[in-house]
Image: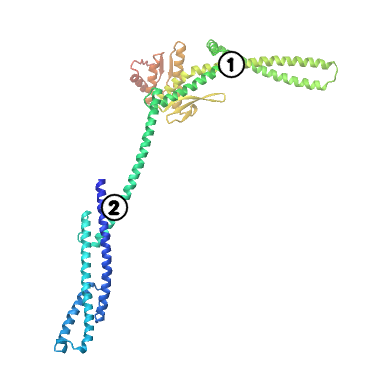
Amino acid sequence: LLEERLSARAAALGAWDDILLARARIERATGERARIHLALASALQSVGIQPEAGEALEAMVVTADRFLDRQAKVDAETLKGTWLEDGIAGTGLGSVLDQLSELSKALQDREAMRMRIGKMQADKTGFAEEVARLGAQAGDPAGDEAPEQGSARLTERLEQAERAREARANLLLDVQKLQDVQEALNAEIAAHETTKQQVLDAFGVKTLPEVAERDERLRERDGLQSAVAELEERLTSELALDHFTQARSLLESADLDGLAIEKAEIERRLSDLDEAIQQQLVRRTRATDKLDAIGGDSQVARIDAERRTVLLEIEEKAARYIGLKLGVMSASSALRVYRERHRSGMMSQASDAFALITRGQYTGLTTQPIKGGEVLIATQRDGQSKVADALSKGARFQLYLALRLAGYYEFAKLRPSVPFIADDIMETFDHLRSEEVFRLFGEMACVGQVIYLTHHQHLCDIAKAVIPKVAIHELG
């Protein structure tokens, strides 16, 4: 297709050169025609013939021929029977010769004009034939239109061809640039693919999302390891031990109930010591004031001795207070670590249960520390979160049930299981959420006995559908 267009373009350019040559000939012939037209008009005017405005040259030539023929007949008739019929006398020879000279010039001009008109017509015919040939060669036959219109159309097509050639050259340049860009991109893609394969091989997976997931897990693992190491170091430091294994053994053998009671007792004693210190400070201030107000007798020595005694007593009680305060801090830290260790599994189970009960409306649970404790937060499907107090009534019931289920599993890990009893907690649940709850109850039944009390018959039907082996007891 490109070779055909190039061939057509070369043919069009050759035709355009022929058109330009024909145009030059036409312009020369047109100029000559105008000059002859002006001379013939002047000659006709000289013999009394006034040409019409805009009269064609051919018409003027015909008029001149008719005039000459008519004048020749008139001259013949006029000279018939005169001395000029047989010849010209010597006396009138000069004037006759002048007239003949002028007539000869007129005849020569007429013949030249006829020749020029013939050439112009031949050029016109050649121009029309050339335009027709070029039109046929270009696949655009002229038809009945004038050659000038065909020439203008071919000129326009040639200009379009020139523009198309320039556009093609620009397109070829753009294609080359795009090919260069494509090669660079292919090289970059190949480098990325190599790097990607190295990363996939390093992580032992097949896709980049799996790499991102593995990387996130590794980061989470590193963060957890750092947090665990920090907690171990802090716990070891607060318990004044050399190794964390000693602290863990100490905490595992500790009685949490006893520690809680001891903590409360220590806090009460610290409160009493704080009050005693305040009183001693007040007494010290008063003693200082009294010391400044007394003179220099033996009473000064006695007061100084009392002051020393009070200071020693304050120092002793302050040391005891500091020891008790450190013990309370250690006990609090130990209790916090214990809760964190045992709460993570319970929180995970509660999150899974809450997500299942809400059928994915909430994806999990988490906690956020606040002043004086922590607050429970529910994470929604769209990524937003709500505190437990901001949940709807039904959602709070579902959250309460999820926490009870997780607590029951945590309790059953450490102690013999006891019956789990729930009293119509699903009164605000819809049909689908009730099915999920009964499914969870069915899984709990593998750990311990589950008892659900209700006065809604449709819940009994749901329980039968979800747990075929359920035992339903109707109370009178």
Please tell me whether residue 80 is drawn above or below residue 339 in the rendered image.
Answer: below
Q: Is residue 74 left or right of residue 270?
A: left
Image location of residue 229, percent across then percent down: 52, 18
23 vs 362, nearest the viewer: 23
Please tell me whether residue 200 is drawn above or below residue 266 in the rendered image.
Answer: below
325 vs 388, nearest the viewer: 325
Q: Regarding mark 1 in the picture, which secondary structure is present there?
A: helix
Q: Which numbered disc, 1 or 2, marks the residue closer to the eye?
A: 2
- Dot 1 or dot 2, earlier in sequence: 2
At a point 70% along the width and 14% down the height, the residue shown is 316
Looking at the rendering, in which quadrant would you find the N terminus?
A: top left
Q: Which residue is mark 2?
A: 161
Amino acid at dot 2: Ala
Q: Would you call the spot at circle 1 few (<14 residues within 10 Å), some (14-19), or many (20 or more)? A: some
Looking at the rendering, in which quadrant would you find the C terminus?
A: top left
Instruction: Report how far apart the C-alphas of labels 1 and 2 lie in the structure.
Output: 90 Å
Q: Regarding mark 2 in the picture, which secondary structure is present there?
A: helix
Q: Which residue is mark 1?
A: 237
Please tell me whether residue 4 is drawn above or below residue 129 in the rendered image.
Answer: above
Q: Which of the 4 image quadrants contains residue 100?
A: bottom left
Image location of residue 378, percent across then percent down: 46, 26
Dot label at residue 37:
none
Amino acid at dot 1: Ser
Q: Would you call the spot at circle 2 few (<14 residues within 10 Å), some (14-19), or many (20 or more)? A: some
